[in-house]
Amino acid sequence: MADKLIISFKEYTQIVEKLAIEIHKNYKPTVLVGIMRGAAPIIDILSRVFKLPIAYIVIQSYSGKGIEDKQGQLMFAREISSLASEKDFNRVLLIDDLSDTGLTLNKSIEWLKNYGPTKNYISEVKTACLWKKKSSKFEPDFCAVKLDSDPWIVQPTEHYEELSIEDIIKKNK
């Protein structure tokens, strides 16, 4: 297994803020589209900062015990989840937590540009992520941290995957 990079919640929000500054200086998106579930906390913060409508693409990619550092086949949900109007999709900022291999971001751009309800409104898609791993073949338009290795990034909420509701109840007695 790859080395682990453990990120605290404070570090996480600082990295999101660094990304927000980079975006603000270089791009004026009209909608934020998050790749779920990695982008959920990022898009929450950025939508509050930029006061922009949001949308979500749900993709399942990693699966199976013991293969956390291998990418599985990508499966896209049928629809975007959003209350944004079609015209909001003029300048899209597509957001994910990281560029690991780059496959998810590449395929998401392709999927988004072919998505029926909004494809005729999209004039531009730019990408943003918090981390880019060394071996990623994809170069995001905006990236807060470019790593010189390929660690497994342990994000602040990731420990919940190992907890059951019973564990949480016990912990909170």
Image: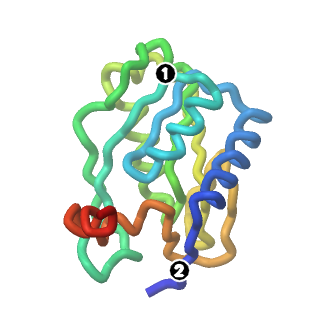
Q: Where residue 21 sits: x, y (%)?
A: 75, 40
Q: Which residue is drawn at 33% across and 19% down?
A: 117
Q: Residue at x 57, y 75 (%)?
A: 5
Disc 2, disc 1: CB below 8 Å? no
- CA separation in Å, label 2 and label 1: 36 Å
Q: Which of 153 and 103 is in front in this view?
A: 153
Q: Name the residue under label 2.
A: 4
Toward which corner of the image does residue 139 lie, by quadrant? bottom right
Tell me the quarter of the image containing the N terminus: bottom left
Instruction: Please rate how many residues cluster around mark 1, counting C-alpha atoms within 10 Å: few if below 14, some from 14 to 19, many from 20.
Output: many
Q: Which of 164 and 83 is in front in this view?
A: 164
Q: Name the residue under label 1.
A: 89
Q: Where residue 171 sits: x, y (%)?
A: 32, 68
- Amino acid type at circle 2 is Lys
- Vertical position of residue 168 compared to residue 148: above or below: above
- Amino acid type at circle 1 is Phe
Counting every numbered tag in the picture gives 2
Q: Which residue is drawn at 30% across and 72% down?
A: 162
How was the colour assigned to the protein in this rendering?
A: rainbow
Q: Where residue 140 sits: x, y (%)?
A: 62, 50
- Vertical position of residue 139 compared to residue 24: above or below: below
- Vertical position of residue 60 compared to residue 149: above or below: above
